[in-house]
């Protein structure tokens, strides 16, 4: 697969503080790459190095085929950046901001009007075209910022916590736009501290903690790495007898709470089949049965040793 | 490559003029400031006004360039808008030069207004319009570059104002605006020669009041040019340092 970002030992030090500590990773063309970590993990510092807003203290990276240390202007031509804060010009309208972005990125003059029109339509901003940026709501501002980052059709778009500070509805609509971007083949480098968001959007996730990457993999495989094995849970018509519990106990550890039985097991299929078979033998009715996998949150906690509460959850939105 | 940079400079300049400088309150300030300045001096000191005229033009340039520009740069830094420019495929030199041009144009508008007032009411005579324009342009660019240096060296808008005053007031008193440099006591006069405005005032007087020889004027413009490049270089270095 073609790599559009390849970071090697990328390091950022601020007066003795190692914000990013020799990280190496690769991003494939067309994927959504999620950079997931708590506040202060080094996500923003990493993006800032990759897009030329700050110089690495050590290491380097190839972005869109160019070395960030030697050919940063070439990198800048090929990437779009959505920074943490919505930093367009309050004094200019949404349309004027997009026009200025297209001028800065040297979009051919005759293509500017159509591109701006397309972007306004696509982000449902057409009726806000002549509204001053400063007068827009947070959610709309984010959309204009993303539109501005796309005006030169970048190969890669970097988004630094795009949904942070947004209400649940705006965040959800923004995620739809991100999913659409990926469908069109744009590579998306996305940082977030919302575990659910990374799980939903990212093809691959890098877990970053204290400037170090703990693991890089697909959300599914990260979940698989967790030792906590799946759980088979059933509600029976009566409390099962001792013998049945003993038999099930050979498949994994069994928990019983009156009619609710749960088996933590390494082999879901065998557990399901045995449970149904034994229940039938004993003349018990299976009223409900389900299996659970460890969530990305469980995986995150196990891999990083950080409690999920210290990451912000979807529920705490808006309290920031 | 060069074309891309020039285009970028042009668009940033146009955006700044539109978003900040050419707003009605700024325009009216730009007209009122020289008017009040001219009026105040003509009431106080009706004699020898013509002697003061070139200095007043220089003073209008000082306040016109540094006042707004420092605010624009520090403000954009705080809001993160400056980062947008730094993300664009342009060199930091071009970004700074665009900012400097914005300040210089705004200062230019104010100094032109002052010049018009001085010609109409103080009977100032511009003996060499070409050299006058060159000197004024160089002065505006140099002072604007100094304003940029101040702005990139600080974080807050008010700090930029305070720091600019450290340069502005000594320039008003030591650069020959009111008091001829020759009559400034010797140790202080050395400071005068370290201030770019001294060379501006000298040259402006040379193309209005006196018939200074071309040689002297060339020296003044050369010194101003050196100051300009020095300030540009220093502000670029400061900006780069803040990206470290
Ligand atoms: N300009 C800076 N100067 C000093 N320390 C910084 C600077 N930027 C970030 N840091 C520190 O570096 C660490 C990583 O920050 P950051 O990259 O912003 O993390 P994240 O985006 O994951 O929240 C934090 O401890 C932060 O305080
Ligand atoms: Mg951050």
Image: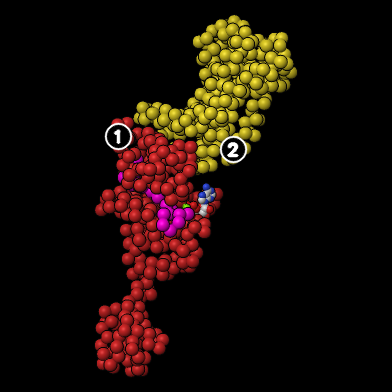
**In what element is the residue under mark 2?**
helix
Question: In this orientation, which residue lies closer to the viewer: A137 or B34?
Answer: A137
Under 8 Å from ligand 2: the CB of mark 1? no
Chain A as rendered: colour: red
Is the residue B31 above or below the residue A129 in the image? above
Q: Residue at x 57, y 25 (%)?
A: B28
Looking at the image, residue B208 sits to the left or right of residue A58; the answer is right
User: On the image, numbered disc 1 is attached to which residue?
Assistant: A111
- Indicate the quadrant where residue A254 lies: bottom left
Looking at the image, residue A273 sits to the left or right of residue A263; the answer is left
Q: Which mark is residue B157?
A: 2
Chain letter, colour yellow in render: B
Question: In this orientation, which residue lies closer to the viewer: B100 or A213?
Answer: B100
Residue A43 in view (yes/no): no
> x and y percent of residue B153 in the render?
57, 36
Q: Residue at x 37, y 54 (%)?
A: A173
């Amino acid at each position: 697969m073609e790599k559009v970002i390849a970071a090697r030992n990328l390091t950022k030090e601020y007066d003795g503080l190692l914000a990013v500590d020799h990280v190496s990773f690769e991003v494939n063309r067309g994927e959504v790459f999620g950079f997931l970590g708590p506040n202060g993990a080094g996500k923003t510092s990493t993006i800032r190095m990759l897009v030329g807003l700050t110089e690495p203290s050590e290491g380097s990276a190839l972005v869109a085929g160019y070395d960030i240390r030697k050919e940063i202007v070439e990198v800048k031509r090929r990437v779009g950046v959505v920074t943490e804060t919505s930093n367009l010009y309050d004094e200019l309208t949404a349309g004027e901001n997009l026009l200025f972005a297209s001028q800065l990125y040297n979009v051919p003059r005759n293509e500017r009007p159509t591109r701006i029109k397309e972007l306004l339509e696509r982000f449902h901003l057409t009726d806000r075209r002549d509204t001053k940026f400063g007068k827009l709501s947070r959610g709309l501002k984010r959309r204009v910022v993303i539109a501005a980052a796309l005006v030169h059709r970048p190969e890669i778009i970097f988004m630094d916590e795009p949904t942070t500070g947004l209400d649940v509805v705006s965040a959800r609509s923004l995620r739809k736009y991100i999913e659409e971007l990926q469908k069109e083949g744009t590579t998306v480098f996305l940082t977030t501290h919302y575990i659910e968001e990374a799980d939903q959007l990212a093809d691959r996730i890098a877990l970053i903690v204290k400037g170090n990457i703990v693991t890089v993999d697909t959300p599914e495989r990260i979940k698989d790495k967790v030792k906590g094995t799946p759980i088979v849970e059933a509600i029976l018509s009566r409390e099962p007898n001792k013998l049945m519990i003993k038999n099930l106990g050979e498949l994994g550890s069994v928990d019983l709470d009156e009619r609710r039985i749960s088996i933590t097991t390494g082999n879901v299929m065998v557990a399901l089949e045995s449970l149904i078979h034994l229940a039938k033998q004993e003349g018990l009715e299976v009223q409900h049965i389900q299996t659970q996998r460890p969530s990305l949150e469980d995986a995150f906690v196990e891999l990083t040793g950080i409690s999920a509460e210290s990451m912000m959850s979807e529920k705490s939105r808006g309290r920031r | 490559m060069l074309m891309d940079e020039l285009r970028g400079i042009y668009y940033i300049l146009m955006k700044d003029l539109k978003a900040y400088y050419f707003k009605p309150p700024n325009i009216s300030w730009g007209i009122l400031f020289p008017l009040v300045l001219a009026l105040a001096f003509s009431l106080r000191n009706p004699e020898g006004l013509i002697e003061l005229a070139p200095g007043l033009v220089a003073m209008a340039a000082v306040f016109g360039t540094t006042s707004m520009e420092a605010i624009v740069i520090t403000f954009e830094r705080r809001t993160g808008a400056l980062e947008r420019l730094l993300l664009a495929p342009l060199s930091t030199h071009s970004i700074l030069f665009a900012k400097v041009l914005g300040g210089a144009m705004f200062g230019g508008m104010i100094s032109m207004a002052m010049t018009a007032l001085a010609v109409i009411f103080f009977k100032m005579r511009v003996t060499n319009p070409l050299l006058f324009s060159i000197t004024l342009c160089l002065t505006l660019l140099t002072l604007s570059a100094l304003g940029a240096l101040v702005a990139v060296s600080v974080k807050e808008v008010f700090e930029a104002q305070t720091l600019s005053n450290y340069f502005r007031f000594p320039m008003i008193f030591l650069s020959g605006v009111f008091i001829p440099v020759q009559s400034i006591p010797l140790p202080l006069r050395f400071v005068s020669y370290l201030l770019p405005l001294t060379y501006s005032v000298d040259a402006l007087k040379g193309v209005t009041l006196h018939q200074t020889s071309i040689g002297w004027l060339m020296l003044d413009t050369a010194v101003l040019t050196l100051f300009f490049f020095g300030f540009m270089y220093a502000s670029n270095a400061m900006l780069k340092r803040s990206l470290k």
